[in-house]
Image (cartoon, rainbow, N blue to C red):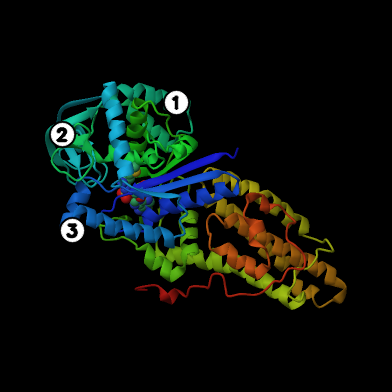
Amino acid sequence: MKKTFYITTPIYYPSANLHIGHALTTVMADAMTRYKKMQGYDTYFLTGSDEHGLKIERTAKTEGEEPKAYVDRIVAGFKELWQRLLISNDDFIRTTEERHQKVVQEIFRKIYEKGDIYLSTYEGWYCTPCEAFFTERQVGEGKLCPDCGRPVELVKEESYFFKMSEYAQPLLEHIEAHPDFIQPVSRRNEMINFIKSGLEDLCISRTTFTWGIPVPLNAKHIIYVWFDALTNYISALGYGTEHDELYQKYWPADVHLVGKDIVRFHTVIWPTILMAADLPLPKQIFGHGWLLLDSGKMSKSKGNVVDPHVLIDKYGVDAIRYFLLREIPLGMDGYYSEENLIQRINTDLANDFGNLVSRTVAMVEKYCEGKTPSPEVEGAFDQELSALAAAVPSEAAGFYDKMDFANALGSIWHLVHRANKYIDETMPWVLAKDPAQAGRLGTVLYNLLEVIRIVTVMITPAMPALPEKVWLQIGVDGTSAQTWAATEWGKTEVGQVVKKGPALFPRIEVKELPNK
Ligand code: MSP
């Protein structure tokens, strides 16, 4: 039986259109899914939208729309963006769907019947943009949200509580026994300290608005939006229904990929809910860093969001995906600026990779009648090039496995650089002048085509639209290049038609930069 791999992104709030920072999480999850598929896994990739709660209710009102009409409109835009970014999700769950609501109520009921949910009164502070409860001590004198810095609201109302405090010890034990449960390590340590400082029971219902899932048996209460949202990871798999095949096959998830701002919800609230419901915990929560602008984190209220549609129109989907994956070091923040993006496009994509392909293809057309030559005569530098081409796939795979895309691509680019250097060292244009060197020339060009093939296989998870264009130019049958095993040296077939096409990544003239 094939090994399975289940990966999720957070489900996004339709409180505004998505910006390029949101795209980072989803592009990472997509690249990971594509990579695992190439490694032979049976993958399942879930994303969706988190549509309930006070924040959405208020946003809809300011837009002059009913909540449902509002979320329908915004969520249609999410789906369109994911298509344009070539996101290969298997499902898109909306928390307003009946299949989801039923499961949330079922989990609530299960935990209530077990005695871990009780009715009391909540008195404390609430941050609506973060949809999070805070204590007097956490909001301080200024009454500001400790997470986003915005003013919090005082709440006093009858609420259901989840006995989260009782799960602090089992949760700590789980985290300690499973070193990979929270990644990267810095986030793990942060969470261990947070839990050790003590967990309180969690307020899990509100009565002062209506846009949400009612508590079973007490419909004047609406289930807390995070309790509702987190459950998407199993409701989408049909948990608790007659058709729970996906749940049986894929749960527990291999990784919940989330931004660092919501690691706490995923490593404290979600696992304790699952423990209370007697369900297995996900294998890993991976908290990635943020994409920042020089002026700080992108947010609608700051008015500094970058629209992914505009960037895709201008630079193409592969370049945007490459930038997002290359620019953010594992678990850390990275910076977006149009200058950085253009620099990556011009240097890595146009100069390094694009030129490698166009020079090689042009030489095969000119010197070998446009057919893949046969490698006849070994010579200087071949060994070094092929040894690197043999080593990089396992090095890059090691990085991909850790979701360290920046280093995976960095390692692949070592090979691209080495191949460009090999052209300078072997000087095929000089060999071409001497008929006695025809065999050697064939070998050099074969080796270059082979490196291009191997590199293209390895960058497929990051740039899924690219391979087809490269295969057309270097005469490779794409169906033979869809697995990681295809990175093995020597698979390029002799005699294939090689044909120059348009530049894969045209250079961006810097004068096109806005306001420069
Ligand atoms: N609805 C919740 C998640 C519920 S999951 C059960 C939520 N939604 S969100 O739309 O605000 O954020 C979705 C994801 O986008 C989060 O992982 C968040 O960290 C990520 N990002 C939002 N802005 C970002 C950047 N500027 N950079 C990187 N990631 C960013 O939270």
The Cα atoms of the two marked residues, 1 and 3, are separated by 47 Å
Q: Label 3 neighbourhood size at 10 Å, few (<14), some (14-19), many (20+)?
A: some
Where does label 3 land, which residue? 65
* Label 3 secondary element: loop
Q: Is residue 139 above or below residue 369?
A: above
CB under 8 Å between callouts 1 and 2? no
CB under 8 Å between callouts 3 and 2? no
Mark toward the start of the polypeptide (3 vs 2): 3
Residue 397 shown left or right of residue 488 in the figure: left
Q: Residue at x 60, y 54 (%)?
A: 458
Ligand 1 under 8 Å from disc 1 Cβ: no
Amino acid type at image mark 3: Glu
Where does label 2 land, which residue? 124
Ligand 1 under 8 Å from disc 2 Cβ: no
Where does label 1 land, which residue? 176
Amino acid type at image mark 1: Glu
